[in-house]
Amino acid sequence: MNDRPSVRIHPTADVAPDAEIGDGTSIWNQSQVRERARIGAGCIIGKNVYVDVGVVIGSNVKIQNNASVYHGVTIEDGVFVGPHVCFTNDRVPRAVNPDGSLKRDEDWSVVLIRVRSGAAIGANSTILPGVTIGRWAMVGAGSVVTRDVDDHALVVGNPAHRLGSVCSCGEPLRDEADGAPFRGACPACGRPFPPTEEAD
């Protein structure tokens, strides 16, 4: 039963009693939000999304259907997570120890991931442990992110590599011929790039 009147939780969603859910957030059908997870205000958690124990999600975040957000992930405000995105948290995954015994919680170490404000992660992308995705960065669909992504960087591929820059409005911006980041006004919105604190 939803005892949070400003929060919309679908009857088929499974939300732990101690999970913190911000005002105006919607959690759709068959999603699971585990113990001690914290989700900010105004978020949309799509169908069949898994939010693991202790995950931290900021406000105004959109997580699309079938995404998996595992323990150790922090997602800041205003982030877009496309469908089927998977955040991993184990650099040396094994089901069993060398002696054949099933691994338990104490047999491995969680490796953290952080997604900074305004970033967008395209559908079917995989984010490896230990990665930070910068503010307003964009990860192209189907990418495998193996290392940190700079603020306002556009990355694609497996492993993900820099294709150029991206404006806060989402417009891709080609880097200069010498590889330096784009400089000038965004052709879509007119914002200066690189952005100033005031414009960003």
Image (cartoon, grey):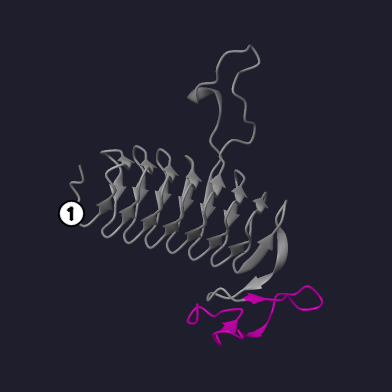
* Main secondary-structure element of the magenta-colored stretch: loop
Is residue 108 magenta-colored?
no
Report the side of 138 relative to 3 (left or right). Answer: right
Magenta region: which residues? 172-200
Q: In the rendered view, would you say 188 is above or below 146? A: below
Report the side of 62 relative to 137 (left or right). Answer: left
SS category of the residue bearing label 1: loop
Task: Name the amino acid, label 1.
Answer: Pro
Q: Residue at x 37, y 57 (%)?
A: 44
Place of residue 196 in the rendered image (x, y in percent of width and height, measured from the top left)? 54, 80
Is residue 178 magenta-colored?
yes
Q: Residue at x 58, y 76 (%)?
A: 167
Identify the residue under disc 1.
5
Place of residue 91 in the rendered image (x, y in percent of width and height, measured from the top left)? 63, 36
Q: Quick one: 187 or 136, which is closer to the camera? A: 187
Q: Residue at x 43, y 59 (%)?
A: 62
Q: Quick one: 130 or 185, which is closer to the camera? A: 185
Q: In the rendered view, would you say 140 is above or below 100? A: below
Report the side of 156 relative to 22 (left or right). Answer: right
Q: Residue at x 27, y 39 (%)?
A: 18
